[in-house]
Amino acid sequence: MRLRWLPRPLGLGSWLVLAVLVIAPLAQILLIACVPEFGGTDGTGMRAALRTHDLWSALGGTLSLAFITMGMTLALGWALAALMVEAPLPVAPLWEALLLAPFLLPPYLTGIAWSLLLQPGGYFSQWFGGISAPLGQALYTLPGMAWVMALHLSPLAYLMLRAALLQRPESPRLAARVHGAGRIRTWLRIELPSLAPALAGAALLVFLAASEEYGVPAVIGSYAGVSVLATAVEESVSVWPVDLPKAASLGVILCLLALLVWLPYRRLSRVPTDAPGQRSRPPRWTSLLPVLAFVLLADVLPIGAIVLTSVLRAVTNGVSAANLTLAHYAAVLGAGSVGMQALRTSLWLSLATALASVALGLLVAGSLQRRRGSPPPSRALDLLASLPTALPGVVVAVGLILFWNAPWNPSGIYGSPLILVLSYLTVTFPYALRYAQLGLAASGAKLDSAAAVHGAGAIARFVRIVLPLAVPALAGAASVVFALSMRELVTSVMLQPPGTQVISTYVMNQFLQGDVGDGMAMAVVGVFSSAVLLGLARLGLRRA
């Protein structure tokens, strides 16, 4: 039985909105890259990009970085998941929160933090002297970049592999051991095949995230001499002379790479995981040291470096009472300062994106629910709504530039803050959609049908039945979208109007210009303000 509260014209409107957000920018990229009349008759475009050394260098850097990051992330995530399942620590929720905390920091902030720790004259060189020099040299290499990204992405692999370990059945392992199979043979013949779908899904997800990453290569890659497709696309748009056909061509290649990974991951993510759960094990302290080591590397050192830098007059002067100051926070939070303007801009842009994504997610989720009896249209709409998950941020930004700045498009959205709302909405919409689907599932179709039978109109059913039951899930969607919008970097860098800055671009600009104290103060304020607003929203929802 399907929900009937959504009128058919509004259901068709979801196709139109998604076409504007997703299809139109992608079509514009393909036209510029592949059609000579659009890409230029002077040899620019896809064919010219395929003949340049820049493409193959960036593609090689992207693949190498993604594969190395995938290997490191799987190793970290699998080790942590096995430790927490086989030898859970006391007060498990606290350790779970610490293991998941690295994903809350934007990857570019993690890269900046490790640069502050290991750069010449950084904290490690001040504390440990020349012993830390090899570590600093290792950071500015391809494996060093992969290590920073692996620390950020390990929580994703940990969650997927931990769920798989908890859901594996005990009886096949016990039967194998009873019949004389050793530990290694049991692991190879029984356990590893049962974990294969989760391992493959985690590997594909990490590869997709690493191949799209812009922040870490922008912070560390230039010093390491590593070029990736994401930074190459951004340079084609932001460095004079601007080469939009080249940016579109590189974007198409990066998008195809992402789609080749995303499509099998999308299929794997639908694999049912209804195996019986594993028996709970008594807490033990044997896994404390490895977990503490990860928490130190992924939480304490990066966050400590960010907070410490925000209260020091100069990093090179060392940590001392005379070097402590709150001047960076005063500069950021001062009335009329650039930092305060960036904070306010990020807040209202993220709030507008959260509200728009929730409304659009509810609209598309209702349309999908209504079309459940017609699989082809429903699958096409679901695929279109999920497609932004596979689109790299640089590709979204280039598509929006080409579409909204086209000579035939008189809307004037490009060059205004609304272009940032559109970019955030495109990137974060799939998350809002999934939460909205959960909210509609909570409301159910029986209540809607019963109300319709008793004469309630579509608006009354939506306001009195569907919306109240879906509010918790929609509030979760707004929280996630708000947090993701506050940290978005690459689309902000490429699309922010002149004279406009947001938190992420302010932090990046201050770091690149050498005024790292103000940048880290803004990072602390941004993360803290986001956490406070999210906490207040959840508190109000709980009271309601």
Image (cartoon, rainbow, N blue to C red):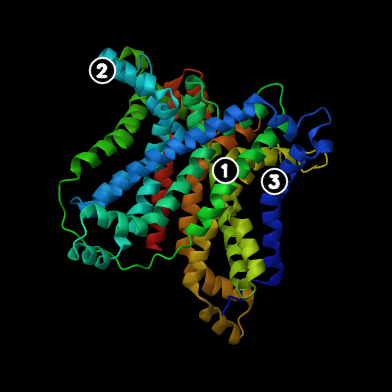
Mark 1 and mark 2: Cα distance apart in space? 41 Å
Q: Residue at x 32, y 36 (%)?
A: 299
Q: Position of residue 242 (x, y in %)?
A: 71, 26
Mark drawn on residue 26:
3
The mark that comes first in sequence, 1 or 2, is: 2
Q: Are marks 3 and 1 in contact (CB under 8 Å)?
A: no
Q: Is label 1 in a helix, a strand or a loop? A: helix
Query: Is residue 154 shown above or below 497?
Result: below
The residue indicated by pointer 2 is 127
- Judged by depth in the image, the label closer to the viewer, 1 or 2, is 2
Q: Is residue 68 left or right of residue 446?
A: left
Mark drawn on residue 455:
none
- Judged by depth in the image, the label closer to the viewer, 2 or 3, is 3
Q: Position of residue 85 (x, y in %)?
A: 25, 54
Front one among 538 and 38: 38
The mark that comes first in sequence, 2 or 3, is: 3
Mark 2 and mark 3: Cα distance apart in space? 50 Å
Query: Is residue 396 shown above or below 164?
Result: above
Q: Quadrant of the C terminus?
A: bottom left
Q: Residues within 10 Å of mark 1 (few under 14, many from 20)?
A: many
Q: Is label 3 in a helix, a strand or a loop? A: helix
Q: What's the residue type where badge 3 is placed?
A: Leu
Whether residue 98 is visible: yes
The residue indicated by pointer 1 is 349
Q: Residue at x 29, y 65 (%)?
A: 169
The mark that comes first in sequence, 3 or 1, is: 3
Query: Is residue 476 shown above or below 451?
Result: above
Whether residue 335 is visible: no
